[in-house]
């Protein structure tokens, strides 16, 4: 019985999960947290963070220790004869060295990597922005298709009423059989349009699921947001939007950081022309043991001192300064500096490309705002006139002065006009949201 309740509870939770409707904010937050491209760039930034930590540790001295052991057997030449030479050798050393001077190479390298870290962070923000805009556009597409579904449902209801009326009038003999057939065909067409609109909603929802990279698309839905027919107005001019975008857009900030990184890399490369001064210090000792018997002049066996006594007696220290002055390295350093300067120019050109892209996107958004608003006003006028034409066609048909074909044409014209109004409204809304987004206003509905 307990297992049964667990299964029932699990299915209930699954049902609640399937019924959840996502808001635009939830979609955006989920996407920027779980998107694989975002995660990939976060790993790239972690690598840059690690590079920065390693660069800062270059100020510390390098310390190393070593120990070696060797055993040798055999004869060694001695005068005209030879002597047995079986021995065991052991040595140990500990040393450290630190860079004292290289025209600030370590500091310049750290600064260069810091700019790389900044650029990688801005890259992450750029991807998040791109994903957010894609989701916002697709979210509005879902809302548009849902509104078209409502329009299609209304058209089906009207076609159903017309069919019911034609059925009655045909049965009593006041209208011909062709009228009923046309009414039935019109009802079938409207039902088909409704089904197409519903499929378009599902297709738009599926596209959001793909952007969110969810494992399952069935049961996914978004909140039903009511978009007012009173469209909001533009808050800033194009020049104001561009000024803000140039200052705040992450793709531009990333390009600026990469220019600074390229300039810092040039400074790092130029340190190759300067001398390098390195300090070193170390300690060492060794142990030597003759494995073969060794005799003194009296014929007594001579034993080697103990291990620790030899290490104490043989203990040595050393300190030193090493100066490396570059004189000629085939001109490679100079060519490397020239390459760094070229990379600076590439980075500057990339910044201009990013600014051009942002400028074109803002100008296109402004053009779309103006065009879609004019389209919206025209669509409203068309909707008003086609609605009036449909009302006249219904009255005329009821009075017997027009045919059912005239009514169907008028109803189709009205439905198309309603769809055009909805299309223009959502196109305008997205263009305005895009324009506001470049001016630093978060995406909201």
Image (tube, rainbow, N blue to C red):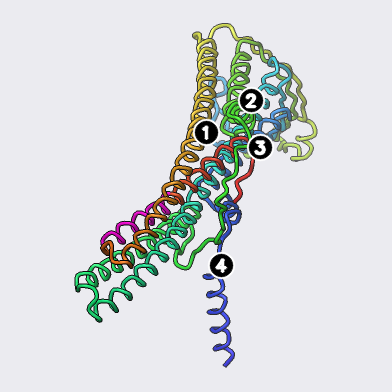
For the question of whether residue 228 can be seen, the reply is yes
Q: CA distance from mark 3 to mark 1?
A: 73 Å
Marks 3, 1: nearer the viewer: 1
- Which residue position holds label 1? 366
Q: Residues within 10 Å of mark 1 (few under 14, many from 20)?
A: many
Q: Earlier in the sequence, mark 2 or mark 3?
A: 3
| Residue on which the image places disc 4 | 20
- Numbered mark located on residue 67 in the image: 3
- The residue positioned 66% from the left and 11% from the top of the image is 275
Q: Position of residue 164 (x, y in %)?
A: 33, 76
Q: Residue at x 59, y 28 (%)?
A: 242
Q: Residue furthest top?
A: 327
Residue highlighted by disc 2: 112
Say whether disc 2 or disc 1 marks the residue closer to the N-terminus. Answer: 2
- Mark nearest the camera among 1 and 4 is 1
Image x and y of residue 298, in percent:
73, 31
* First along the sequence among labels 4 and 3: 4
Q: Nearer the viewer, mark 4 or mark 3?
A: 4
Alpha carbon distance from label 2 to label 1: 38 Å
Query: SS of the residue at dot 4?
Result: loop
Q: Which residues are magenta?
A: 405-420
Q: Nearer the viewer, residue 152 or 224?
A: 152
Q: Are marks 2 and 3 in contact (CB under 8 Å)?
A: no
Q: Is residue 30 above or below residue 305?
A: below
Q: Is residue 321 left or right of residue 434?
A: right
């Amino acid at each position: 019985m307990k297992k049964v309740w667990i299964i029932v509870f699990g299915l209930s939770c699954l049902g609640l999960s399937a019924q959840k409707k996502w808001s635009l904010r939830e979609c955006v937050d989920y996407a920027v947290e779980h998107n694989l491209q975002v995660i990939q760039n976060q790993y790239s930034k972690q690598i840059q963070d690690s590079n920065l930590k390693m660069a800062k540790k270059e100020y510390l001295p390098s310390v190393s220790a070593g120990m070696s052991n060797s055993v040798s057997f055999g004869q060694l030449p001695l005068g005209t004869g030879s002597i047995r030479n079986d021995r065991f050798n052991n040595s140990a050393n500990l040393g450290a060295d630190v860079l004292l001077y290289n025209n600030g190479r370590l500091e310049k390298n750290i600064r260069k990597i810091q700019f790389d870290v900044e650029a990688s962070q801005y890259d992450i923000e750029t991807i998040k922005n791109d994903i957010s805009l894609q989701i916002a556009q697709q979210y509005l597409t879902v809302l548009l298709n849902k509104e078209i579904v409502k329009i299609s449902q209304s058209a089906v209801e009207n076609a159903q009423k017309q069919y019911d009326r034609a059925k009655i009038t045909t049965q009593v003999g006041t209208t011909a059989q062709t009228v009923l057939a046309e009414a039935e065909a019109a009802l079938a067409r409207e039902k088909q349009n409704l089904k197409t609109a519903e499929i378009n909603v599902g297709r738009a929802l599926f596209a959001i699921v793909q952007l969110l990279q969810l494992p399952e698309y069935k049961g996914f839905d978004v909140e039903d947001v009511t978009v007012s027919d009173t469209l909001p107005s533009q808050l800033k001019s194009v020049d104001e939007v561009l000024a803000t975008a140039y200052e705040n857009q992450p793709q531009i900030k990333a390009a600026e950081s990469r220019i600074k990184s390229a300039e810092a890399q040039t400074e790092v490369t130029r340190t190759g022309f300067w001398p390098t001064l390195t300090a070193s210090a170390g300690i060492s000792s060794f142990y030597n043991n003759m494995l073969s018997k060794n005799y003194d002049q009296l014929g007594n066996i001579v034993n080697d001192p103990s291990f620790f006594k030899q290490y104490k007696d043989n203990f040595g220290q050393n300190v030193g300064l090493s100066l490396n002055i570059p004189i000629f390295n085939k001109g490679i350093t100079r060519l490397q500096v020239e390459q760094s300067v070229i990379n600076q120019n590439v980075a500057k050109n990339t910044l201009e490309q990013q600014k051009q892209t942002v400028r074109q996107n803002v100008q296109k958004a402004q053009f779309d705002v103006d065009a879609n608003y004019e389209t919206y006003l025209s669509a409203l006028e068309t909707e008003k006139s086609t609605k009036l034409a449909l009302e006249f066609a219904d009255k005329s048909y009821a009075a017997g002065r027009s045919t059912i074909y005239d009514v169907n044409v008028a109803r189709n014209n009205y439905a198309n006009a309603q769809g055009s109004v909805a299309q223009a409204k959502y196109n305008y809304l997205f263009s305005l949201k895009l324009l506001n987004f470049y001016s630093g206003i978060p995406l909201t509905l």
